[in-house]
Image (cartoon, rainbow, N blue to C red):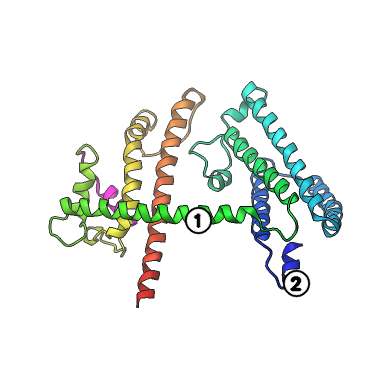
């Protein structure tokens, strides 16, 4: 409604559209998450379509006449949602929903809310309840504003953006210092980068001098080398991409003793895979899964950071040219 009004009248919306779209996207993710938990049947889907038609007709008509009452209504609706999720969390803690104490949250929820590795349904309920509490505050705030008032959350976003920019600049300076120190000590041939064997030596130095396998060096190289060749021994590590790759290896290094111990105990065939977890070893298997997820998440995060940094560097270079 506000978007169409802004287009029709050819004037700014004072920041309302962005906040309302964020809320809509967040609620859509709630739906997609719970659909993963309980697959709706045809009767349920038909009921949703019918209810949506009736509700949206009344809601749009009301919004045209007096928008604040719609935001106030949604605020009270979100308050009820907060109470509902609070009751669910209490039921989980009291044992009425004991299965949800250990049942894993759907992967779509882990990715969207950045939940911890091995997050349970209780963790998901906490995240969703926090969303609903935020929606309650936002809609009650919008209900108190005149239609032409500036959305106060826009100013908050601007402050957050500035803080994020300052943090990135500070982190960039720290990263450069870290890279210079590593290169000063381990770049034996003074090429301004690390070769395959030089990288192996540095990885060994931060791993209690254990022997670093070719696969481990290749993994770090695959994240931190600008050009990916078949022969990894000929790759030279790119300094700008080194920090996120190093962070991923350190996360892997911290988890490796636990992972090795659990694999020694449960990988009976020595195949490099744990086929299944029995009830007897649920706690141990959960620890193994959590460590594996933490390493995978660190690797994914590092790769994303490396890709982003590479794109930013390319853009900056193009601008200079």
- Of callouts 2 and 1, the N-terminal one: 2
Along the horizontal axis of the image, is 98 left or right of 267? right
Residue drawn where x is 64% and y is 45% of the image: 33
Q: Which numbered tag is attached to residue 307? A: none
* 132 or 110, nearer to the observer: 132
SS at badge 2: helix
Residue 75 is situated, as x and y percent measured from the top left of the image, at 74, 44
Residue 275 is situated, as x and y percent measured from the top left of the image, at 45, 36
Location of mark 1 (residue): 161
* 280 or 84, nearer to the observer: 84
Residue 210 is situated, as x and y percent measured from the top left of the image, at 21, 38
* Vertical position of residue 108 compared to residue 260: above or below: below
Q: Is residue 208 visible from the viewing direction of this image? A: yes
Along the horizontal axis of the image, is 165 left or right of 200? right
Q: Quadrant of the C terminus?
A: bottom left
SS at badge 1: helix
Quarter of the image holding residue 9? bottom right
- Magenta segment boundaries in residue numbering: 210-223
Residue 172 is situated, as x and y percent measured from the top left of the image, at 34, 55
Distance from the alpha carbon under mark 2 to that under mark 1: 29 Å
Q: Which numbered tag is attached to residue 9? A: 2
Quarter of the image holding residue 204? top left
């Amino acid at each position: 409604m506000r978007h169409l009004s802004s287009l029709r009248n050819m004037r700014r919306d004072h920041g309302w559209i962005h906040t309302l779209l964020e809320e809509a996207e967040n609620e859509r993710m709630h739906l997609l998450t719970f659909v993963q938990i309980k697959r709706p049947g045809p009767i349920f889907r038909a009921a949703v379509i019918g209810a949506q038609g009736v509700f949206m007709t009344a809601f749009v008509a009301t919004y045209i006449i007096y928008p604040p009452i719609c935001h106030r209504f949604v605020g009270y609706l979100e308050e009820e949602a907060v109470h509902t999720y609070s009751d669910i969390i209490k039921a989980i803690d009291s044992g009425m929903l004991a299965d949800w104490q250990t049942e894993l949250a759907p992967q779509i929820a882990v990715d969207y809310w950045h939940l911890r590795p091995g997050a349970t349904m209780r963790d998901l309920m906490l995240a969703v309840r926090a969303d609903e509490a935020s929606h309650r505050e936002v809609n009650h705030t919008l209900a108190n504003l005149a239609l032409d008032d500036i959305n106060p959350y826009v100013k908050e976003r601007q402050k957050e953006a500035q803080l994020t920019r300052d943090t990135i600049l500070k982190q960039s300076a720290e990263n450069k210092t870290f890279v210079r120190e590593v290169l000063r000590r381990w770049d034996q041939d003074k090429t301004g980068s690390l070769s395959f064997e030089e990288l192996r030596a540095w990885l060994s130095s931060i791993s209690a001098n254990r022997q670093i396998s070719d696969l481990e060096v290749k993994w770090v190289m695959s994240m931190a080398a600008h050009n990916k060749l078949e022969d990894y021994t000929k790759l030279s590590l790119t300094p700008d991409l080194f920090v996120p790759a190093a962070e991923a290896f350190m996360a892997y290094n911290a988890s490796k003793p636990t992972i090795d111990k659990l694999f020694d105990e449960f990988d009976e065939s020595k195949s490099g895979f744990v086929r299944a977890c029995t009830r007897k070893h649920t706690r141990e298997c959960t620890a193994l899964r959590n460590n594996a997820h933490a390493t995978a998440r660190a690797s994914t995060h590092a790769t994303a950071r490396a890709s982003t940094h590479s794109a930013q560097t390319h853009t900056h270079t193009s601008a200079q040219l």
